[in-house]
């Protein structure tokens, strides 16, 4: 299949992939002081070249580096923004749920204690390496957290008032910093950029909104602020740069945080967010129905995340086609595409699947898309 429709492509994927054991071992040896940064990076390079070939072998047009150089899908980027400091001893506790109970994820906290800027593209050298190893017909994609994630993780309490006396000043600076990132990575030749965002999906969950309200935040309108600030970051983006967003309700070791359909944010999100496509989690009942897709305007692509990365069982191709048909009642089939619901390894630990099970999921996406769209 030669997919000339994207990006995002008819068969696509979110970004992160399971880390191979040799890479995990190298990270452990580096942490123990047994190897230096150059040897770790050489191991990363080799693993990334392998995983780029894997993506091409299963028929994907999108190629990512699997986020192999990161410990976390978002915090590595956020801590690299000038003006943001990683704060230990003020860990953020995020309660994840799964079929067996709960599990806590505790990333370090953050403080905005200086003027925000991104003078050189974050992950720029990493993306340059990805560009150097992609195969013919592959489009390298960079995935980064959206501006919303900086605020959602800490809120006003994380902002030093001596630097930004009010949230408007903070938001202006953050969006300007992200605009630097967008321009810089596009100048490097990036044509496919994805802003990953859990906050816009979390806000559909009444329990999450109640938690924010208890902190004194404007939970009923938070998503509107986030949409405005993402748009500000993307305003005037370079020609030829496709930007998508991916939204999920948490992904850590096959567990999740939030529940609920996209109904609460749908009208403002789909009608107002200035991106070219939406990667949406739709792998089980937690994600709600397809009715919110009625707000998607013409010209924007919806990538249906129908194949779960949380469980190894392979979905039925017929079931996937049926669900695509259901979604097509609310947005035309030609605006739809297919992907896994999230990454396979949003953090270094990864979800509870094997490499072969991951490959089978990706191949299923490609095969199903070929049969649906040709």
Image (spheres, grey):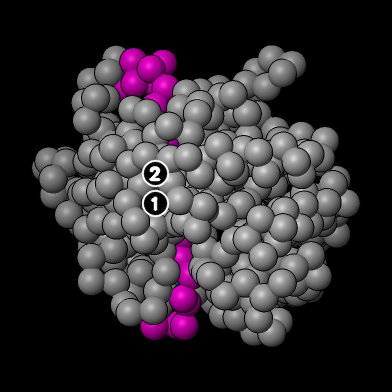
Q: For the point 25% across and 33% down, which residue is it?
A: 222
The percent coordinates of residue 210 (x first, y second) are 34, 15
- Rendering quarter of residue 244: bottom left
Q: For the point 88% across and 51% down, which residue is it?
A: 356
Magenta-colored stretch includes residue 211? yes
Q: Quadrant of the N terminus?
A: bottom right
> Taking 325 as reference, is 268 left or right?
left
Q: Is residue 248 visible?
A: yes
- The answer to whether 119 is drawn above or below residue 344 in the figure is below
The percent coordinates of residue 202 (x first, y second) are 43, 30
> Which residue was labeled with disc 2?
149
Q: Which mark is residue 183?
A: none
The percent coordinates of residue 288 (x first, y second) are 51, 26
Magenta residues? Answer: 187-212
Q: Is residue 37 visible?
A: no
Q: For the point 52% across and 40% down, which residue is it?
A: 327
The percent coordinates of residue 264 (x first, y second) are 33, 27
> Taking 90 as reference, is 53 left or right?
right
């Amino acid at each position: 299949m030669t997919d000339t429709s994207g990006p995002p492509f008819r068969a696509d994927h979110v970004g992160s992939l399971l880390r191979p054991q040799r890479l995990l071992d190298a990270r452990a040896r580096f942490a123990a002081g047994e190897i230096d940064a150059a040897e770790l990076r050489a191991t990363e390079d080799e693993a990334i070249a392998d995983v780029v070939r894997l993506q091409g072998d299963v028929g994907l047009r999108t190629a990512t580096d699997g986020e192999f150089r990161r410990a976390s899908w978002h915090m590595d980027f956020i801590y690299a923004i000038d003006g943001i400091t990683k704060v230990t001893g003020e860990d953020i506790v995020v309660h994840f749920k799964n079929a067996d109970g709960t599990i806590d994820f505790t990333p370090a906290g953050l403080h905005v204690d200086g003027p925000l800027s991104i003078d050189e593209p974050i992950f720029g050298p990493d993306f340059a390496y990805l560009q150097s190893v992609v195969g013919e017909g592959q489009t390298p994609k960079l995935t980064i957290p959206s501006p919303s994630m900086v605020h959602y993780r800490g809120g006003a309490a994380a902002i030093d008032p001596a630097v930004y006396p009010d949230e408007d000043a903070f938001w202006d600076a953050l969006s300007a910093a992200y605009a630097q990132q967008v321009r810089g990575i596009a100048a490097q030749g990036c044509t496919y950029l994805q802003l990953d965002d859990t906050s816009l999906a979390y806000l559909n969950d009444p329990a999450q909104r109640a938690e924010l309200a208890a902190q004194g935040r404007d939970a009923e309108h938070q998503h509107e602020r986030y949409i405005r600030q993402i748009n500000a970051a993307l305003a005037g983006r370079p020609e030829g740069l496709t930007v998508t967003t991916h939204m999920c309700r948490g992904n850590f070791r096959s567990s999740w945080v939030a529940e609920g359909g996209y109904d609460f944010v749908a009208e403002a999100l789909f009608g107002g967010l200035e991106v070219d496509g939406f990667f949406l989690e739709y792998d089980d009942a937690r994600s709600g129905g397809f009715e919110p897709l009625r707000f998607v305007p013409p010209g924007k692509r919806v990538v249906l995340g129908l194949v779960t990365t949380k469980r190894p069982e392979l979905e039925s191709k017929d079931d996937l086609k049926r669900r695509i048909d259901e979604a097509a009642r609310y947005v035309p089939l030609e605006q739809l595409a297919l992907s896994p619901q999230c990454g396979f390894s949003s953090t270094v630990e990864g979800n509870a699947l094997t490499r072969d099970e991951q490959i089978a999921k990706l191949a299923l996406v490609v095969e199903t898309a070929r049969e649906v769209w040709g």
